[in-house]
Amino acid sequence: MNSTVSTPLALIAELTHRCPLHCVYCSNPLELNARSNELSTDAWRNVFTQAAELGVLQADFTGGEPLARPDLVELVSAARGAGLYVNLITSGLPLDESRLEKLVAAGLDHFQLSFQGARPEIASEISGTTTHAQKLRVLEWLRGHRVAVTLNFVIHRRNMDQLPEMLAIAETSCATRVEFANVQYYGWAFANRENLLPTREQLNSSLGILKQAQERLRGKMRIEYVVPDYYAKFPKACMGGWGRKLMLVVPSGDVLPCHAARVIPGLTFENVQNRSLRQIWESSAAFQKFRGQEWMQEPCRSCDRREVDFGGCRCQALLLVNDAAATDPVCSLSPNRNKVDAVLTRVADIPVTATAADVKPAWIYRSNPT
Amino acid sequence: MTPDLNSRPRLAPGCRLNDAKQQPRVLLMPEKALRLMGPSLEIVERCDGQHTVRQIITELQRIYDKADPQKVETDILGYLSLLNDQRALDFVDADASVGGSVA
Ligand code: SF4
Ligand code: SF4
C-alpha cells in the first residue's frame, strides 16, 4: 500500500436516497439518485467484503432511509458476516417490531434513532410528515433487544429551546448514548440556512445545559455535542481529513470522500461496479485531490493546526468562497471569515420565531427521488 | 465510580471484540474503537458476565507476576471504570443470575 495513504476506518453506505421524510436540513444532495440506479444486494455484499479486506472496521448504514430497502436484513447480515461493526442510522420508519427483531438477529450492533425535536409539532414541521409517535414506539421496542442505542437529536434555531425535554426522552429510554448535532450547512440545510442557524444566546445556553447533563449522567449515558462550526474559532476536521478515515458509497455505487463532494466542480467519482474499492481509495483522483498538504493555501499551509483540522471542510470553502482549496472560511484565521460573520449578524436580527407560520421565507422541503 | 469487587462486568449491548483472526484486536462500540493489546485485551476478554472483578484481578496478577500486585489491581479498577464511563460495560450484580436482564 502507498505509504502516504492511511487505512479507512469506516464505510458510510448510503443505501438509498428514498425516504418517507422531507427534512429541511437533509444532508443528501439536491440531485438525488433514482431507485432504478441503486446497487443490488450482491453489489453491496461485495462492497462490504472489500471494505473489510481494506481494514475498515465499521459500516454506517444511512440514506435516505435505509429501512426503505426491502433487503436491509440481508445487508446487515452481509456486513456483519464480512467482519464489520454494523451501525444503522434511521428515522425509525417504516419499521415494525418483527423487522426490528430480524435486524438484531442478523447482527446489527448499533441503532441510531434520529429525532427532529422533543414534540410532535416540531417533528412534523421539520420533516414534513408525521413521525414523532412512531419514533417513541420504536424506542419502546428497543428496550427488549440486545443492541446499542443512540438517540440523535438534530438541533437548530427552531428546536434548541427543547433541549431539556430532549434530554428527558433520552434519560427515560434504553439509550446509552445521545448525540446533539447542530445542523451542518450543506445540501438542503444550506438552502434553509437563515431559518436554521441558532443565535449566539441560544448556543451559549445550550452549552450550559449540556455540560451540566454530562456531569450528572456520567457513567450512565454518553452525551456528545456537535457545535455549529459557523460559531467556532477553528473548523472541524471534516470527515477526519479528506481521504484519511472515511469513504462514502452513494446509492448508485459512486465512491465519495465526503457527503457533499459532488458540489465541487471538476471532481469525478469512480464506481464500485467498475473498480475495486482499494484502487478507488488508494489512487482515484477524487480521493487524491485533497490528501496530504500539497493542495493547501495560506494560511493553512504554514499553520500549526494543519494536521489537526486539515484546513477544514472543502465543500464549505466551495460553497462560501467558491474555491474548494481555500481555508475553510469558518476558521478565524481565514481572510474570508467576514463572510461567515455577515451571516451571523444577519441571523442575530431575525427573531427566534414562535410558530411555524412565522418562518420566512417558507421552508424548502427535501424532495424524493423517482 | 469504583467497580464492586464481587460484580461481574460484561460488555454492554453493541460493544464487542472484533474477530480473533483480525489484527489489531479492537473493542468496537458506538462511534468508537479502542485498540487493545496485552493487559487491556486480557481484561476485556474476561468481561464476560462470568468473571468477577476480583477474579479478573487475581488472574492478571498471576499473568503479570513480575508487576506489583497492588498496581495491577489499581490499573484494572481504573480501566474498568473508564470503560464504564464509555458505557461499554454492564455490571452484573454479585447475586443476580448470569445472562439475566440486559441494561
Ligand atoms: S435527513 Fe430526513 S429527509 Fe434526509 S434522509 Fe434523513 S430522515 Fe430522510
Ligand atoms: S488556518 Fe487552516 S489549518 Fe490553520 S486552523 Fe485555520 S483551517 Fe485549520
Image: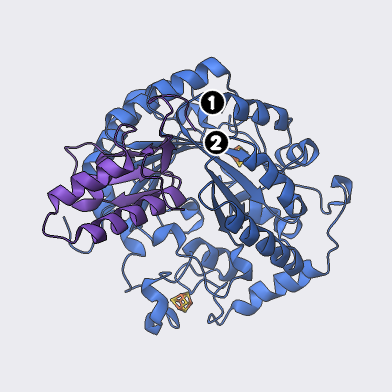
Which chain does tag 2 point to? A
Horizontal and vertical percent position of residue A200: 73, 69
Mark 1 secondary-structure assignment: helix
Q: Residue at x 26, y 41 (%)?
A: B55
| Quadrant (top left, top right, bottom left, bottom right) of the C terminus of chain A | top right
| Pick the front one: A219 or A251 | A219
Q: Quadrant of ligand 1?
A: top right
User: Which mark is drawn over residue A64?
Assistant: 2
User: Compared to A240, does A293 lie above or below?
Assistant: below
Label 2 and label 1: CA atoms lie apart by 8 Å
Mark 2 and mark 1 in contact? Answer it, CB < 8 Å: yes
Three-letter amino acid code at disc 1? Ala
Mark 2 secondary-structure assignment: loop
Tell which residue pokes out farthest to the top in this image: A98
- Which chain is assigned purple? B
Which chain does tag 1 point to? A
| Pick the front one: A348 or A317 | A348
The quadrant holding residue A204 is: bottom right
Would you name the residue on which mark 1 appears? Answer: A68
For the rendered model, the colour scheme is by chain
Q: Give left or right: position of B9 versus A234.
A: left
Query: In the rendered picture, chain A carries what hue?
Result: blue
